[in-house]
Image (cartoon, rainbow, N blue to C red):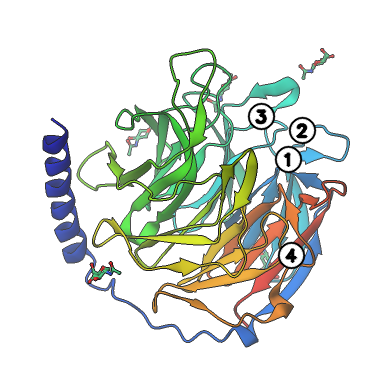
Amino acid sequence: MQSIKFYSKFILLGLLECYFISANPNLQKRQENINLDTWKKFEYTLSAPRSRLAGASAGNMLLFAGGIDSAGESSEIVDLYNASNGALTTARLSSPRSEIGSSSFLNNRYAIFAGGIGKNVTVSSSIDIYDSETGTWILKNLSEARANPRVLDLGNRLVIYGGNILKSPYLSRTIDILDASFNLSSQTESVLDYPQLGASASGVDRSTGMIMGGYENQNPNNRFSKLVASSQTLYIQNLDWTDRLFVVPGPVLEAPRWEASAAYANSQFIFAGGYIINANKEVASNRIDVFDYSTFRWSNQTLTLNSARFSIYSGTIKNHVLFWGGSESKMLDVYNSVERKMVNPIPESLFMNGPRYEAGQATLNNCLFAVGGGFDSNGEKITNLVEVINACN
Ligand SMILES: *[C@@H]1O[C@H](CO)[C@@H](O)[C@H](O)[C@H]1NC(C)=O
Ligand SMILES: *[C@@H]1O[C@H](CO)[C@@H](O)[C@H](O)[C@H]1NC(C)=O
Ligand SMILES: *[C@@H]1O[C@H](CO)[C@@H](O)[C@H](O)[C@H]1NC(C)=O
Ligand SMILES: *[C@@H]1O[C@H](CO)[C@@H](O)[C@H](O)[C@H]1NC(C)=O
Ligand SMILES: *[C@@H]1O[C@H](CO)[C@@H](O)[C@H](O)[C@H]1NC(C)=O
């Protein structure tokens, strides 16, 4: 039974690969001449300090939405930064909330903010959509209210996967799909052994996305969860000829770990850092795993971060994945997906001012990588600072 499932999966993926190579003849490796010495850092501030906020970009705007403010209340504030002229404006979400899932959509025209936790620990079903062309907001509802859903931009479809729910098994298996007319449909993930909340990344060029690692509930039918670091991966493909997404388990992770980060670059999914629990202690990892879209395998290459850490802010600019900060660190690591190696040395001028956690993150137009809000590493000071790496001139 197992082998039949396995076999048919690979036949399907073989077909997919033929389809994508023939459909996208221009998807070849592009050499990017990157000189990190030309990258610059700059800062701006949010209208109010907050943690657990969500970041996304739309058009030429960087948005940081919601979060928990310094009084410990859910916030509805959205701070918008216009990267063309540096102007800062604010808007409001349809409801105050934190732990929102976010992404850009439809060629970066829209920024999507889905779900979250509202006042008095209620989970939200709201989807707030910012249209950068009109400056207006569109509202939709998820089919199931949840926090921290993973939002994947698959080109002409947006996937809002899973998230935290308040009842057993506490991890949602719902997949909501927004099409290009913002019509919503849903399907249920039913292929993984256990419900999971992993790191996510998507590649618009390949209409593909993955959920990797994170944690899973191995006791899904019980009031009491058994949460463990997950080795499961979920592979999601958007296909032109069908309304349903193609969803299959991907090859498992060799070294599952909590709080690892993910990104997509140049037909590769990169999964980095995290921690394992050893004798009741968190032991940070410097491991990087690379999943290759064209072979449907994890690479056997050994790559490492310059410092072991978890909850790293990650984003992709010009085929380079940036791993910024994370746990007690302010360091930057950079993965060059064209040469499939780490870039070293990294100029210290690109490090964060200091470590921070529970911040939001976003990339803009293949040029900017921004990390905003959150706490300092002592967990004492909540900040309104946004630090931005500018990889363009
Ligand atoms: C951003 O700034 C540019 C340049 O000043 C301006 O043309 C554009 O309208 C601004 N965008 C928004 C959404 O305000
Ligand atoms: C939250 O709970 C408090 C205390 O029970 C109540 O006073 C308040 O109205 C509730 N807020 C909302 C938005 O439901
Ligand atoms: C979303 O759901 C709420 C509560 O059920 C409802 O009041 C609202 O009209 C819905 N919004 C949309 C855009 O469907
Ligand atoms: C989306 O919904 C609208 C209104 O319900 C409908 O007219 C339109 O055909 C739908 N679009 C797609 C692509 O299904
Ligand atoms: C890694 O994989 C490549 C290609 O699949 C293979 O040629 C190579 O021998 C492998 N290296 C190790 C160390 O396993």
- Secondary element at image label 3: strand
Label 2 to label 4: alpha-carbon separation:
23 Å
Q: Are marks 1 and 2 in contact (CB under 8 Å)?
A: yes
Residue on which disc 2 sits: 74
- In the image, residue 353 sits, relative to residue 218, either above or below, namely below
Q: Are marks 3 and 2 in contact (CB under 8 Å)?
A: yes
Label 1 to label 4: alpha-carbon separation:
17 Å
Q: Residues within 10 Å of mark 2 (few under 14, many from 20)?
A: many
Q: Are marks 1 and 3 in contact (CB under 8 Å)?
A: no
Residue 367, quarter of the rendered image: bottom right
Q: Residues within 10 Å of mark 4 (few under 14, many from 20)?
A: many
- Secondary element at image label 1: loop
Q: Please name the amino acid that badge 2 sits on.
A: Ser
Whole-percent x, y for residue 106 in the image: 44, 53
Instruction: Describe residue 169's horizontal placement relative to residue 72 as left or right.
Output: left
Q: Which mark is residue 67?
A: 1
Which mark is first along the chain, 2 or 1? 1
Residue on which disc 4 sits: 387
Q: Please name the amino acid that badge 1 sits on.
A: Gly
